[in-house]
Image (tube, grey):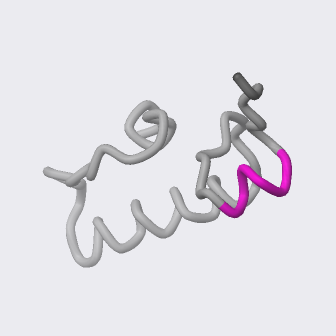
Amino acid sequence: MESLDLHGERAALRGNPSFVWRAGQNRRLDMIVRWGLAGRQRVDRILVDGCGVGMYLKAL
């Protein structure tokens, strides 16, 4: 059985999620919140599609 390559080239090709919060995730979170607010005082609902390891859900 081969070991799981979480951060290498093979992982990137296969779409493995990042397990480390980085600047790109922070930028995407800012976009989600900004677009979700769009003329509102607060965000009432956010649909989380369930891919990845739940980093955005935890941040929201």
Q: Is residue 20 above or below residue 23?
A: above
At 75% from the left and 28% from the top, the residue drawn is 2
Start-end of magenta stretch: 8-13
At 28% from the left and 76% from the top, the residue drawn is 38
Could you tell me residue 51's position as x and y percent? Answer: 38, 47
Q: Main secondary structure of the magenta part?
A: helix
**Foreground of the two, 45 or 42:** 45
Could you tell me residue 9's position as x and y percent? Answer: 84, 57
Could you tell me residue 7's position as x and y percent? Answer: 81, 43
Could you tell me residue 3's position as x and y percent? Answer: 76, 26
The picture quadrant where one finds residue 10 is: bottom right
Q: Is residue 52 above or below residue 28?
A: above
Query: Which quadrant would the C terminus be assigned to in this image?
Result: top left
**Foreground of the two, 34 or 23:** 23
**Foreground of the two, 11 or 19:** 11
- Residue most toward the front? 1
Query: Which quadrant would the N terminus be assigned to in this image?
Result: top right
For the image, the number of numbered tags is 0
